[in-house]
Amino acid sequence: MSETQNEQILDQQNGVVFGTSSAARINDNLQTPNSNKRDLEEDHLRNEKNKLTKLDAPNYNSSVTKIDPDFIDFKTRLLRHINQTLPYEETKVFSYLTETRQEVSRILKQSIIQKESHSAIMVGPRNSYKSFLINNELRYLSKEHSDQFIVVRLNGLIHSEQTAIKSIALQLELELKRLNQDELTPTDDSVDVSTGSLTEVFEKVLKLLDATKTHANKDGSVSAKVSVIFVFDEIDTFAGPVRQTLLYNLFDMVEHSVVPVCIIGTTTKLSISEFLEKRVRSRFSQRVIYVPEPNDLDDFVIATGESLSPMVPRTSDGEIVYAKKWNSIVETLLKDESSPLFLEVHKNYETFKSQTVLKNSFIPLVGECSNFEELQDAITTCKQITDYGINQYQNDITAMVQTLSDLELVILIAAARTILKSRDESTNFNITYVEYSSIIKSLNARIPSTNNLNSTTDKILDNLVKLWSKEDVKNVWETLQEFKFLTEKGAMGLRESSLAVFYASNYLIQTSTIPFDLRTYNMQVTLHDLRGIVSKSSMFYPWTQL
Ligand SMILES: Nc1ncnc2c1ncn2[C@@H]1O[C@H](COP(=O)(O)OP(=O)(O)O)[C@@H](O)[C@H]1O
Ligand SMILES: [Mg+2]
């Protein structure tokens, strides 16, 4: 036997051999005639393996036993509850929204069950549960009346007038197909629905709807008419002062269609009915539903409690125990005004006043826990919620201004100055650059120059602030746009007057031809704001007022 083989055997007897190298060595040894040795080595390897599994096994088992399936069920339920994705019966609607919910429910029931035509617009800030309330009611109604209505969804941020009409035709077609599964749908009618002018298309849509009213149920009885529910998100985008053809046609349908039609719009604009054209307004039911916000801290705390405590399930006993325990923990924490949870809720109420922010901070807190004790600990200390909150503060405009470089800051200040001086609160790159260079020049004039002192020597100590060239500053200008400090003028939402629309639409047509330097911008931060944000020690602080 060679020396190396001897060494290997020694190695293995000492228990140093692992992994692939050992396999290779076994192969080596297979070639040796002495099979006893091979047996010995295999025994040894087996022993090693046993040792390893013995070491690992207890750890593995103990970590498995800690995970309790009931807890996992409970955690999933809690997360779904926080996300409001539980089935209808188990979904809680915040109590401050009860009246709104009833109103939405009434309108939808009247349209779907009593076959009346209605229209309403829900007004409320973003994330104020407008869509949630509508969808929740539709979910409820579709359980028993799914063959009684069709939902057509439109969104002002996605659709233009032309695509909206196409989308209506398409959605109707699909829904009708769903309703008359076994019957042949009049395809030749529906194929070309979306062609032609807006009014023509609407006529065709109405015809299509009329045809549905006689459709027969599976059991042979002729069912009542099918209601059409239009859920129209961001309805204000179609209420511009130009021509509100789509809205006119839709609301006209509510008045004149044989088929019951219900339009529920949502918007964030409080004064929505003022924006509707006269002929549209006269067809609109004037039913505007204002989605409330929690009135005071008490309401807000109650809502938090509701969003944190799911209904006690009727499933396994273990889960019920957890749910009850959890709900009582949340209740006591929220009652105690010095508990970290209450303080966090209070802080949120004073700052964001947003259940959404709060909800988003609960999700990782719950998600990371692997047993009930951890969960209890997490909600009692609320450390994660505090950390989450701190991260949220970083996103505001103050924090963003503080991250700007000196050059970006001075351009921002220059732009804010030109906006104050201008008549229509807008600025462009050219004016801003002129302002910027004048700031730098007057700043440099104040810095005592070393030139005069050293005029005899060739060395000139340059301690002046550099005036960057126009080309270089363009880059900065674009950065400021990216940070949303500057918004291009044509990109604003609803216009105040028809004159503003005229300018904006002209502007949009021209943007492609307007040179970079002359494009007009509005600003999201004023000079006054900047005076509060820019630190007093900054060399540009004096320019934060005119
Ligand atoms: N798909 C979703 N999953 C989880 N949460 C959602 C979802 N959609 C919306 N939400 C949350 O539900 C709440 C209400 O949203 P929504 O009803 O869409 O508001 P809006 O009033 O803007 O229509 C918000 O807190 C939002 O973050
Ligand atoms: Mg919405």
Image (cartoon, grey):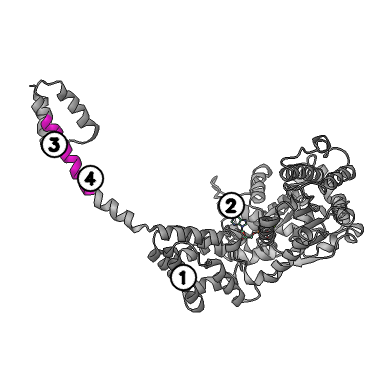
Residue 72 horizontal/vertical position (percent): 43, 57
| Viewer-nearest residue: 201 or 73 | 73
Calculate the distance from the C-alpha at mark 1 to the C-alpha at mark 3.
Answer: 55 Å
Among numbered discs 1 and 3, the one appearing first in the sequence: 3
Among numbered discs 3 and 4, the one appearing first in the sequence: 3
Calculate the distance from the C-alpha at mark 2 to the C-alpha at mark 1.
Answer: 80 Å
Q: Residue tagged by mark 3?
A: 44
Residue 234 horizontal/vertical position (percent): 75, 55
Q: Residue tagged by mark 1?
A: 324
Residue density around tag 1, few if under 14, some if 14–19, many if 20 or more, within 10 Å: some
Would residue 51 be counted in the magenta stretch?
Answer: yes
Residue density around tag 4, few if under 14, some if 14–19, many if 20 or more, within 10 Å: few
Residue interval drawn in magenta? 39-55
| Viewer-nearest residue: 245 or 459 | 245
Residue density around tag 2, few if under 14, some if 14–19, many if 20 or more, within 10 Å: some
Q: Mark 2 against mark 1, which lies toward the viewer?
A: 1
Residue 94 horizontal/vertical position (percent): 62, 69
